[in-house]
Image (cartoon, grey):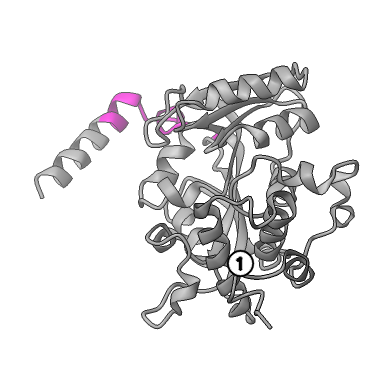
Amino acid sequence: MPNPFTDFPNVDRRTLLAHLDAIPVDSYPFLAGYSREDVHRDLAGQGGLFLASDMALLLGLKPGMRVLDLGCGSGETSIFLARHFGVEVYGADSDAKMPEKLARKLADRSFESPVLPFTVDARRLPFEAASFDAVFCMNSFFYFGTEPEFPRYLSAFLKPDGRLAIGGPCYKTELAPDTPAEFLLEYPACLSVHSPSWWKGHFDRTGKYDQIVSEEHRDGVRFWPDRVHRLVEEQGIEEMREGTKQMVAAMLKMIANNDDGYVTHFILSARRVPSPKRLPWQFPGVTREQVEAVLDHAQYSLVNA
């Protein structure tokens, strides 16, 4: 008898679905009224709106806030944030066709809340400093955000006290030379996938954030079979494109060997460090010119060291 995890795609669809864990929508009260199709519609990666809703709830969103949805894909998370929280969302992605896709979605759904699309390079954002009350980034940060200076760069676009939430795939601990090959999904991009503790240090060392919490998601391991379940449920096996079949086959082999939950998902939340109540030159006896002279001397000394 074929093994549903190792013999895909030469397996029976019903048997495969029976071996995959599908997360019930009613286990996420915030998503009341959503179907499984709604949760996963047009979203890349795992977790769907299960992950998005938990990330959003950490941001303390209120109507009228301005939110940057970085790496927003086709804009489903942007619509979700605007719909549920009444916020103004700037959907930013490198896909040149994203604005057109998002405009079509908004028109089809007669959705009038403010969702503004931008085609951007995440490393060269076109926004003014302190433009956003919150930054949201799901299933994409590891593609562009692992450079040491990127969290510091991103902090410039948050208002003081503004909050950030990122979420996506992770490893329980950092990759090791003997990590099984079946855990190296989407190679070489997986080399930029890290552990929750690595991500915490990545943001903490900038000095630009506090209240940093980085943890495995409670359903992080389940997101993998749940995603495969939805793909098979939605497309069948015969109708899948060859690339999708290869992706599903790789995920199934990983799931079959992931008994200890080494491959999972995480959420990191953090607050932009507030501005000091008084700038240095506002203290008694200290002038702005004196502070600038000290800074200029320090910069000169470092350059010429």
Q: Is residue 30 left or right of residue 230?
A: right
Counting from the top left corner in percent of width and height, residue 17 is at: 76, 65
Counting from the top left corner in percent of width and height, residue 84 is at: 80, 33
Q: Is residue 19 magenta?
A: no
Residue 77 drawn above or below residue 205: above
> Measuring 65% from the left and 40% from the top, which residue is drawn there?
42
Counting from the top left corner in percent of width and height, residue 15 is at: 76, 71
Q: Secondary structure at mark 1?
A: strand
Query: Does any portion of residue 117 appear in the rendered image?
Result: no
Query: Does any portion of residue 182 appear in the rendered image?
Result: yes
> Measuring 60% from the left and 51% from the top, which residue is drawn there?
240
Q: Which quadrant of the view contains residue 261?
A: bottom right
Quadrant (top left, top right, bottom left, bottom right) of the N terminus: bottom right
Q: Is residue 290 magenta?
A: yes
Q: Is residue 210 left or right of residue 304?
A: right
Count residues near mark 1 (Cα–Cα under 10 Å), then give few for <14, some for 14-19, many for 20+: many
> Measuring 57% from the left and 75% from the top, which residue is drawn there?
262
- Which residue is nearer to you in this view: 199 or 84? 84
Counting from the top left corner in percent of width and height, residue 274 is at: 56, 38
- Which residue is nearer to you in this view: 70 or 187? 187
Residue numbers of the magenta segment = 277-292
Q: Which residue is mark 1?
A: 264
- Which residue is nearer to you in this view: 300 or 251? 251
- Amino acid type at mark 1: Thr
Q: Which quadrant of the view contains residue 18?
A: bottom right
